[in-house]
Image (cartoon, rainbow, N blue to C red):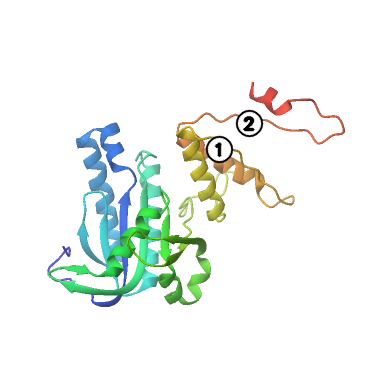
């Protein structure tokens, strides 16, 4: 229910935000119930503060996530981004990389009743959250439509069917910077925060997660010089390492008669 009796539960057209800890059951198994609950409380407290700071109304907490409502879609998107940025800060302060949040957003009509909100909009927002990638944000086409010029920042994610909902839904990724460097000065040899290529990184993440479960594959990254192929490859390698995978690197030499099997030799 709403966090405070003084909060006014919104009715009419609002943007509903759902958060969820990815694979919370696995976290309980790996960390133990007490440690996992402590992590959950830390993340919940952070998310509550972000929602309040963006003028949202916390509707209810659900153990491994929360539901909030916003009169402004723009503020809802800002809150979703802020939550993911704060998750990055918690990771840098010692929160395990396995603890990831996913977020779903949808704008539509809701009905307020006894400190809660109901309606198809709530159901759709929850369905979209379930499709969001780990550490990512998915928004519906309705959110995209009401954002105004800010919609240009969103990245089309394709169409999908939502369980129990008629017709296909077009969804959009909300990009989030990988790092929040604040006022810190980067060392000369430190990489700058990686921003952009959200769709490509999500595709790589999906394939890496499949590989970690035993379903291998191959990816070819091509393009003109200077477009960022090497950096994207390094980002993929970092994602693989965070999943506990070993990363081996090999190189081909651009010459008339290159050494045979050179990439495999480099691996060995």
Indicate the position of residue 212 as horizontal and vertical percent values: 47, 34
Kindly indicate whether the residue at mark 2 contacts the one at mark 1 (C-beta within 8 angstroms).
yes
Camera-nearest residue between 37 and 107: 107
Q: Earlier in the sequence, mark 1 or mark 2?
A: 1
Indicate the position of residue 18 as horizontal and vertical percent values: 31, 59
Indicate the position of residue 254 as horizontal and vertical percent values: 81, 36
Say which quarter of the image contains residue 220: top right
- On screen, 94 above or below 263? below
Look at 30% across and 69% down and name the residue there.
121
Residue at which label 2 appears:
249
- On screen, 1 above or below 238? below
Give the CA separation, mark 1 to mark 2.
9 Å
Residue at which label 1 appears:
237
Q: Could you say whether the residue bearing mark 1 is in a helix, strand or loop?
A: helix
- On screen, 16 above or below 64? below
Quadrant where the image shows the C terminus: top right
Residue 22 seen: yes
* Relative horizontal placement of residue 251, taking residue 128 as reference (left or right): right
Camera-nearest residue between 47 and 155: 155
Camera-nearest residue between 207 and 152: 207
Say which quarter of the image contains residue 261: top right
């Amino acid at each position: 229910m709403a966090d405070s009796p003084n909060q006014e539960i919104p009715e009419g057209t609002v943007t509903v935000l759902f958060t969820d800890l990815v694979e919370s059951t696995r976290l309980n198994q790996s960390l133990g119930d007490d440690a996992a609950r402590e992590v959950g409380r830390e993340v919940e407290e952070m998310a509550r503060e972000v929602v309040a700071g963006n003028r949202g109304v916390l509707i209810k907490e659900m153990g491994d996530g929360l539901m909030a409502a916003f009169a402004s879609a723009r503020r809802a998107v800002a809150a979703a981004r802020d939550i993911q940025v704060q998750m990055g800060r918690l990771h840098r302060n010692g929160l395990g990389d396995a603890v990831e949040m996913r977020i779903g957003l949808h704008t539509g009509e809701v009905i307020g009743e006894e400190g809660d909100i109901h309606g198809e909009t709530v159901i759709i927002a929850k369905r979209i959250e379930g499709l969001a990638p780990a550490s990512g944000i998915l928004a519906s086409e309705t959110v995209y439509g009401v954002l105004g010029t800010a919609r240009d920042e969103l990245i089309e994610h394709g169409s999908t069917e939502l369980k129990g909902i008629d017709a296909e839904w077009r969804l959009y990724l909300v990009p989030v910077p990988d790092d929040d460097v604040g006022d810190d000065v980067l060392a000369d040899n430190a990489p700058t925060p990686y921003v952009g290529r959200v769709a490509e990184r999500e595709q790589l993440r999906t394939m890496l997660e499949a590989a970690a479960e035993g379903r291998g594959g191959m990816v070819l990254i091509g393009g003109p010089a200077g477009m960022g192929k090497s950096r994207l490859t390094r980002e993929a390698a970092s994602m693989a390492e965070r999943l506990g995978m070993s990363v081996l690197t090999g190189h081909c030499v651009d010459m008339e008669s290159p050494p045979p099997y050179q990439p495999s030799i480099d691996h060995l």
